[in-house]
Structures are given as C-alpha cells and as structure tokens.
Amino acid sequence: MAENEWSIRVGTPEDWEIIAEFNQRLAMETEEKELPANVIGPGVQEVLGDRMKGVYYCSEANGEVIGQLMITLEWSDWRNGWFHWIQSVYVRKDWRAKGVFTSLYRHAEAIAREDPEVCGLRLYVERDNSRAQGAYARLGMTRTDYQMFEVEF
C-alpha cells in the first residue's frame, strides 16, 4: 500500500485499548515479556491524558489504528535542550514493510526539528533486535556509546 493510504494523528483517550494491546504485543514479540493489562492500560491512559508524560502518534487506515509511536521528553543540561525519546513503536503485522513506521518516524522527526528547543531524537532498542536496529539505521539514526542500567521498583 502507498504511504498516502493511511494518516497519522495524535492518539486520543479513545485509543487506549488498542494502544495498550499493541504495547502488549510489542513486549511479547521483542522480549517475550507479558505486560499485565491492569498496569499497561492505566499507564497508556495516563499518557493520553497528560501531554507532559508523552504523546502517542497513531497511523490509521480505514478507521483502524495500524501503528503507533510514543514520544517522551528528557531535558539535557549538556545541550540545553530536549531530547524526544521514541518509545512503544508498533506496527500491526499485516501492515509491516509498507512504510508505516517510516512515516511515523518522519512525522515525529519533523515535529522535533520544528521546535528550536529540541536537540535530538533518541530511542533504546533490545540488544538482539537486529531487524529494528537495521530500520533505525536506514532512517539515519546511529548507535551511541551509552549502555542503559536500571533499578525497577
């Protein structure tokens, strides 16, 4: 399908169920991790209700959400600007390899480039997810020297 056969819009509170479902599929496909519905559902609703927590962009075709990408913010004192973090990227299997993710990425990139306070885009990717890493590289993103550490509570 051609890129003009879908549109991109900001996610709305009405999208919470499909976004939560896509996040569950993403976690299972990439990490074999199950996200409990009673946690991911309210988490998605929080983002959709508070732009300071993030914003979802949804690709839509024929009235259905077919892909998503979330942006969260991180302030960099070193750069005196905001990094837009790309998270929760998912494209429905029957829409993959058709340009849906590329259009979501380009949409988020254009918004970031328009804002003089944004200093860059970042994302993290599962170490063994070579398919995703290849997609990000084809879009012009480069691997950094950073590794991620965490403590969960």
Image (tube, rainbow, N blue to C red):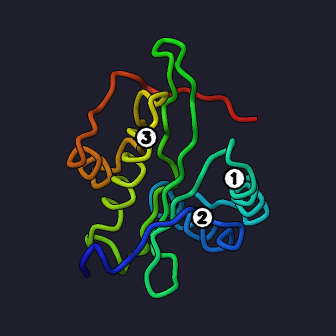
As drawn, the residue found furthest toward the bottom would be 62
Left or right: 44 in relation to 134: right
> Could you tell me residue 41's position as x and y percent?
73, 63
Instruction: Name the residue: 30% across, 76% down.
Output: 4
Q: Which residue is mark 3?
A: 112
* Amino acid type, callout 3: Ala
Q: Which residue is mark 2?
A: 11
Question: In the figure, 142 relative to 57: above or below?
Answer: above
Q: Which residue is mark 1?
A: 47
* Amino acid type, callout 1: Val
Labels 1 & 2 near each other (Cβ < 8 A): yes
Q: Which mark is residue 119?
A: none
Left or right: 138 in relation to 118: left
| Inter-mark Cα distance, 1 to 2 | 10 Å
Of 94 and 112, nearer the camera is: 112
Of 40 and 16, nearer the camera is: 16
> Could you tell me residue 72's position as x and y percent?
57, 42
Quarter of the image with the C terminus is: top right
The mark nearer the N terminus, 1 or 3, is 1
* Amino acid type, callout 2: Gly
Of 97 and 13, nearer the camera is: 13
Instruction: Name the residue: 57% across, 57% down.
Output: 56
Instruction: Name the residue: 40% across, 23% down.
Output: 146
| Inter-mark Cα distance, 3 to 2 | 17 Å
> Could you tell me residue 92's position as x and y percent?
43, 74
The mark nearer the N terminus, 3 or 2, is 2
Question: In the figure, 42 relative to 50: above or below?
Answer: below
Labels 1 & 3 near each other (Cβ < 8 A): no
Q: Residues within 10 Å of mark 3 (few under 14, many from 20)?
A: some
Quarter of the image with the N terminus is: bottom left
Labels 3 & 2 near each other (Cβ < 8 A): no
